């Protein structure tokens, strides 16, 4: 049974702790492999075949292929590693932040300029009717 941490109750927060480190090891190794130009060329040529060289869960594999940035973090990806995939695609941190937030790059950038998300309704899961109820661990791959 997984231990619940205090930060599991913060909406939209996926702390890269020991649990996610273990869960995302192979995913993060894939992302790190994109540091080498030869690997980027192989991935560019055939993403599916390239991913066969990594022991990814089906959910992790789908998240990579669909560029589901939020799922990558939920499935153990470290933002510093998964951002290598975004860079591969020519995306900025604002592009990825917007995608994870369900808003455009421009809206995300303005939100950050304006000071970020409002604290109200974003402190604890279920704090407001607008906060989606999340259950830590749902959809996560364990090996």
Image (cartoon, rainbow, N blue to C red):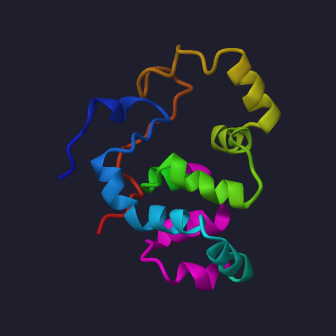
Please give the name of the residue rendered at 34% of the width and 36% of the height, measured from the top-left corner.
Answer: 8
Q: Is residue 68 visible?
A: no
Q: Looking at this view, is 22 or 103 the one in front?
A: 22
Residue occupying the far left of the picture: 1
Up-down: is 72 above or below 47? above
Q: Is residue 22 visible?
A: yes
Residue occupying the far right of the picture: 106
Q: Looking at this view, is 65 or 131 the one in front?
A: 65
- Residue 57: x %, y % from top left: 43, 71
Please give the name of the residue rendered at 44% of the width and 20% of the height, measured from the top-left corner.
Answer: 123
State the image quarter where residue 37 is shown: bottom right
- Residue 140: x %, y % from top left: 39, 58
Up-down: is 99 above or below 41? above
Up-down: is 15 above or below 19? above
Magenta-drawn stretch, dominant element (helix, strand or loop): helix
In the image, is residue 66 part of the stretch drawn in magenta? yes
Please give the name of the residue rendered at 43% of the width and 26% of the height, measured from the top-left corner.
Answer: 126
For the C terminus, which image quadrant? Answer: bottom left
- Residue 81: x %, y % from top left: 52, 54
Q: Looking at this view, is 49 or 1 the one in front?
A: 49
Query: What span is in magenta?
Result: 47-70
Task: Locate residue 76 relative to residue 52 in the image: left or right.
Answer: left
Label tally: 0
Task: Locate residue 8 relative to residue 106 in the image: left or right.
Answer: left
Q: Looking at this view, is 12 or 35 the one in front?
A: 35
State the image quarter where residue 110 is shown: top right
In the image, is residue 1 part of the stretch drawn in magenta? no
């Amino acid at each position: 049974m997984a231990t619940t941490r205090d930060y599991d109750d913060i909406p939209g927060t996926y702390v890269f702790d020991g649990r996610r480190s273990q869960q995302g090891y192979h995913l993060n190794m894939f992302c790190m492999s994109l540091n080498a130009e030869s690997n980027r060329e192989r991935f560019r040529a055939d993403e599916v075949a390239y991913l066969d060289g990594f022991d990814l869960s089906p959910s992790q594999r789908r998240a990579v292929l669909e560029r589901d940035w939020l799922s990558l973090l939920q499935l153990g990806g470290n933002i510093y590693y998964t951002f290598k995939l975004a860079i591969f695609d020519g995306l900025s941190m604002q592009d990825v932040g917007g995608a994870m937030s369900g808003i455009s790059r421009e809206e995300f950038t303005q939100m950050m300029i304006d000071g970020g998300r409002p604290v109200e309704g974003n402190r604890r899961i279920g704090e407001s009717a607008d906060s989606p109820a999340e259950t830590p661990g749902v959809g996560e791959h364990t090996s």
